[in-house]
Each structure stands twice: as C-alpha cells, then as structure tokens.
C-alpha cells in the first residue's frame, strides 16, 4: 500500500490533548454512550490543529485508504489488566482518556455509531481474546486467523471508517490491510465480482450476543432474517478507477451453483493476500481504515488470559450522515 499516511504526536500536542481530554472528561459524559456525541458534536475542534488537518485531509481525499496516528500516552496502571470479557463489570473508566481521544478523532471523520446487536450497542467496543472463543472468526478469537473482511459487509449501510486504538499489543499481533485499488484482476473476474452474485451473511457475533442475552429482541429476528434470506450483492462496486469493496470471506458464498463466481472470489482473495500489508495497533496508536476501499484481517496468536493480552478499542463512523448535514436520530442502529 503506497499511500499509508502517518502522524506522530509531539510533546506539545500531547499536552494540548491532555487538557482537551480533561475538559471533556470533567463534563461527566462517557464516549461509550451515544449522549457524548450529541453533547460534544464538535469535540474535534479541540484536537491539535495539525492533527485535525491531517484527519480532515484524509477524510476529504477520495483516494485515501489507511492512516495511523502514533503517540497517545497510555498509562498501564490506569488502564489496568486486559479484561476477561467485554461486559466489564467494573465499567469503562479505566479507558476513558484514550476513548475521549478516539472519539474526538472519530468526530473529525463523520458520525460515530454502533450496532445495537454488538456489546449492548456501546459506542466504543472492546477487541481482546475471550476464553472459549479461540477458534471464532471474531475480534474475540486468537488461535484462528481472522480472515479478510470489511466491517459489517452484510449491511448496505456498513461503516465508512473503522478506527482501532491500541491499549496494548505486547506480542505485536498485526492487523493486515489490503487496498482494493492495488489488486489486479482480469476483466472477466472484475465483471463477475461486480454483479449481484454473492450472499454476505451477518457474522456470528451479531446473532450470538443477542441469542445469549436478549433472545426476544426484534433486532435479533432482523439479524436472523438477514442470515436466512440474504439479498444478492456485488463484491466490487463504484468507480472502476477507485473501486469499493464489501467482503467477508468466512461469512459469504455465491448465490446458487456458480463455479465461475466462486473462482473469481478465490482469485480476489489471493490478490488481496498478495498486496496485504501488516500494520500494528501498538500501545497508543490509532489505526484508521476506510472500510469501503480497504479490507482487513488479523494474525493468529496464543492468548494468555493473564491480563496482558492484546487489547484494542474500536469505533465505527459513517461519513455520509455528516456530509449530508444529517444528524442521526439514533446512533445505535439495527
Ligand atoms: O483485531 C484486529 O486487528 C482487527 C479487528 C477486526 O477485524 C474487526 O474488529 O473487525
């Protein structure tokens, strides 16, 4: 990927950010809750000027794929051990500083939102290994390689950006990214992949979390409907010079018997592997992926479950909502 953009915070900017985080934090609203974004819709104005410009340039460049921001300080003692589960009975105070920084950067890109089906619809979600999930294709797996996907590819209104903040990543487990613009495909494969020949199903987490905790929720029925009666969709779409992609390798299949399309999908997968690049959401690094033009995967690793495991925080953002001047009625969707 030729166009990875990087910003490293300097000491003066870190001090400025500490003040901004303290100011927003003292108002008592948590970025885990939707109210934070309604209360502080312009909190990105408090970002250091250079960082804010970096983010808006990234957002406004139609060719942008991935960027990373290094250097937000994380205090090991404050964040404490990596939790066992996203339910986190002790609450979210330990990560509030980096969550506020994360939320400010998210607001510079568009409207942060969450899915009601995931982690009780919290606006900042946890990614870390959970005991028993080792072989699952989710952010809570570890031994399983999490294969290429765009986030929530089963939905037409999938996020535009995915933002991953490293609370800790001691084993340097990579997030692999591949830009669809870098791949080479035959005309025929491109055509097949641009036709409505594929079913993309909701990934397990959208259904499993509600089945366990809120089996009577209507949104669970909607998610099951999307799994059992998916609409056919293309994998590639948009302008050929700057193509868009929706894909979720472990949760997709061709519509009916279609060996040609299956082969085109395999070729696409191989190409994504060829152009992939490992990025590290190290402690204090924020990775930002354009979820329309970049696919991502995660390396496998052995979880220790001793409080030192890899821990990321995640926010997803819709750009279109803000671009239209439209404020969502609810930030927790399904
Ligand atoms: O853990 C990572 O690096 C990636 C997580 C991921 O794939 C996701 O949250 O969709």
Image (cartoon, rainbow, N blue to C red):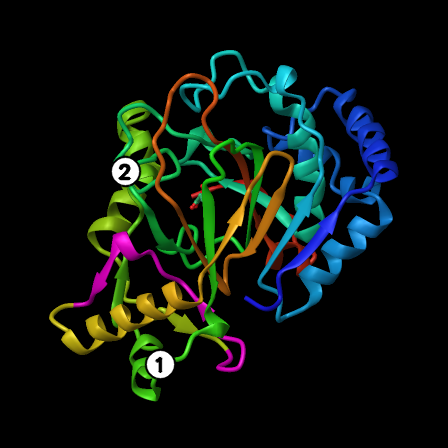
Q: Residue at x 33, y 38 (%)?
A: 205
Q: Residue extending furthest front?
A: 171
Judge the density around disc 1: few (<14), some (14-19), many (≥20) Cα neighbours within 10 Å: some
The boundaries of the magenta stretch are 239-255
Relative placement, left or right, of 159 versus 53 is left
Nearest the eye: 207 or 253: 253
Q: CA distance from mark 2 to mark 1?
A: 30 Å
Q: Give the residue number, with chain letter if any, for mark 1.
A: 190
Relative placement, left or right, of 53 versus 227 is right
Q: Give the residue number, with chain letter if any, for mark 2.
A: 136
Asked if residue 293 can be seen in this view, the reply is yes
Q: Residue at x 82, y 26 (%)?
A: 23
Asked if residue 328 can be seen in this view, the reply is no
Q: Which image quadrant: the N terminus?
A: bottom right
| The magenta stretch spans residue 242 | yes
Q: Position of residue 238 (x, y in %)?
A: 48, 76
| The magenta stretch spans residue 71 | no
């Amino acid at each position: 990927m030729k166009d990875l953009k990087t910003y490293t915070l300097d000491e003066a900017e870190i001090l400025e950010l500490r003040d901004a985080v303290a100011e927003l934090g003292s108002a008592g609203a948590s970025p885990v809750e939707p109210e934070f974004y309604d209360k502080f819709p312009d909190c990105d104005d408090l970002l250091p000027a250079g960082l804010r410009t970096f983010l808006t340039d990234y957002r406004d460049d139609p060719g942008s794929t991935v960027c990373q921001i290094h250097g937000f300080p994380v205090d090991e003692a404050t964040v404490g051990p990596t939790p066992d589960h996203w339910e986190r009975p002790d609450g979210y105070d330990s990560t509030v500083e980096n969550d506020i920084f994360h939320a400010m950067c998210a607001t510079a890109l568009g409207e942060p939102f969450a899915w009601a089906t995931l982690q009780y619809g919290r606006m900042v979600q946890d990614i870390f290994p959970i005991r028993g999930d080792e072989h699952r294709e989710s952010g809570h797996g570890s031994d399983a390689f999490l294969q290429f996907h765009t986030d929530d590819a089963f939905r037409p209104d999938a996020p535009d950006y995915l933002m991953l903040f490293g609370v800790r990543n001691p084993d340097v487990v990579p997030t692999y990214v591949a830009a669809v613009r870098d791949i080479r495909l035959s005309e025929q494969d491109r055509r097949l992949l641009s036709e409505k020949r594929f079913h993309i199903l909701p990934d397990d987490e959208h259904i499993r979390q509600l089945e366990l905790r809120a089996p009577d929720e209507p949104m669970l029925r909607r998610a099951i409907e999307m799994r059992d009666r998916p609409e056919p969709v293309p994998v590639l779409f948009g302008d050929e010079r700057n193509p868009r992609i929706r894909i979720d390798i472990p949760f997709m299949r061709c519509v009916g018997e279609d060996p040609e399309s299956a082969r085109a999908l395999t070729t696409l997968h191989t190409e994504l592997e060829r152009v992939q690049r490992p990025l590290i959401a190290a402690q204090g690094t924020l990775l930002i992926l354009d979820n329309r033009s970049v696919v991502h995967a995660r390396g496998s690793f052995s979880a220790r479950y001793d409080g030192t495991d890899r821990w990321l925080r995640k926010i997803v953002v819709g750009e279109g909502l803000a671009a239209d001047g439209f404020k969502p009625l609810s930030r927790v969707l399904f």
